[in-house]
Amino acid sequence: PIKRLPMTEPNITIDETKRLDTLNSLELLDTLPEERFDRVTRMAARLFNVPMSVISLVDKDRVWFKSKYGIEELESPREHSFCGHAILDDDMFFVPDTLEDPRFKDNPFVNEMPHIRFYAGQPFKALNGQNIGTICVMDTVPRALTEEDNVLLRDLANMVEQEIALVHESTIDDLTALSNQRGFYSLAQHLLASCVRNEQPVSLICFDLSRFDVLNETFGNAEGDRAILAFSTIMKNVFRLSDVVARLRADKFAVLLSDANELQTSFVLSRFEKELARYNESANRGYNIEFCAGVQHVIPTPIVKIEDLMSEVELKLQKQKQLRA
């Protein structure tokens, strides 16, 4: 069924905290355009014969456009958004004529550019079932839709969900659910660019588990996996959501900290060491999880690449390993 809910500014979802945590965990906000999503918005505009189509992600105070067709803006305030209404339900949210609808007739996007007169938005979900955004079509003239159109927009939303799942699978480590090497390089470069714009320092830490091959040989691969999971869990608990945390290979991890100088990085690294020591003492599994770490601090410039920082931190990591040998 097509829903018409009586509201003006969108309400907050019932489980907003979990929804926002889910959205942030996908690490899609403020990323570069991708053809896999742009293809869906072009298809939507063509199939519905409308001048505007958007794949939106509903953040805390804004709606950010992962893909857009026919509009220039990158985002809009959530309080003015149609998509903020749409994510409150699982069915298509439909406004046939905004000037005839008391919820939207005074909306700035109706009375000013882009002069929206028609809106239809279908929510799409993350893998845990949380509504995180919409695929929507818009027009500058009133429109009517059929139940067949409803099915079509739902199919397009399914395509978006599949693409998000593929992005997740191709950039996430299966065992730990951290970013893998591919995901890390992509997200870290984006974070560097953000810190350049905001003139913020960054710190890169590279971890190498000590004697991990001996642990596997002595206790078995299953125990090795448990050690990896424990190490990654402590990383998730200590580092911030705004940091890029990754498992690069079996026994190697990295984290890029944004807006973190040398003193702040030293503090969080000390906290990490204490949390790991606490785990080793409580787990009592016949071995301790230990590591070497290389750290690189920098105030990034536009020419700084994550690959260059990794090369520098790898040299520091090797020196630390030699000192402990």
Image (cartoon, grey):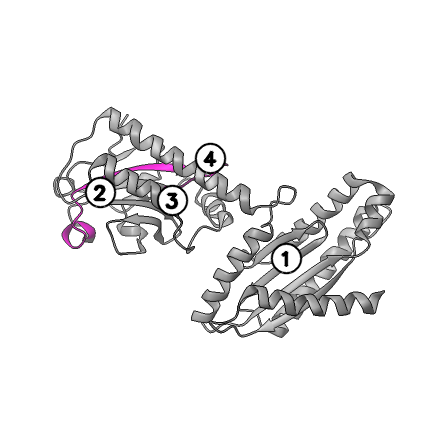
Badge 3 local density, few (<14 within 10 Å), some, or many (20+)?
some
Q: Nearer the viewer, residue 325 or 9?
A: 325
Badge 4 local density, few (<14 within 10 Å), some, or many (20+)?
few
User: Which residue in the protein does label 4 denote?
Assistant: 129
Can residue 260 be seen in this snapshot? Answer: yes
- Residue under the point 44% across and 36% down: 162
Label whose residue precedes the other's in the sequence (3 or 1): 3
Label whose residue precedes the other's in the sequence (4 or 1): 4
- Residue under the point 63% across and 74% down: 263
Q: Amino acid at mark 2?
A: Met
User: Which residue in the protein does label 3 denote?
Assistant: 37
Q: Amino acid at mark 4?
A: Gly
Compared to residue 318, the image places residue 168 above or below, namely above
In the rendered image, the quadrant that contains the C terminus is bottom right
Badge 2 local density, few (<14 within 10 Å), some, or many (20+)?
many
Label whose residue precedes the other's in the sequence (2 or 4): 4
Can residue 242 be seen in this snapshot? Answer: no
Q: Amino acid at mark 1?
A: Val
- Give the image location of residue 256, x and y in percent: 58, 62
Q: Nearer the viewer, residue 85 or 232?
A: 232
Label 2 or label 3, whichever lies nearer to me, is 3
Label whose residue precedes the other's in the sequence (3 or 4): 3
Instruction: Find residue 227 and name its label.
Output: none
Label whose residue precedes the other's in the sequence (2 or 3): 3
- Distance from Cα at disc 3 to Cα at disc 1: 33 Å
- Distance from Cα at disc 2 to Cα at disc 3: 17 Å
User: Which residue in the protein does label 1 denote?
Assistant: 238
Secondary element at tag 3: helix
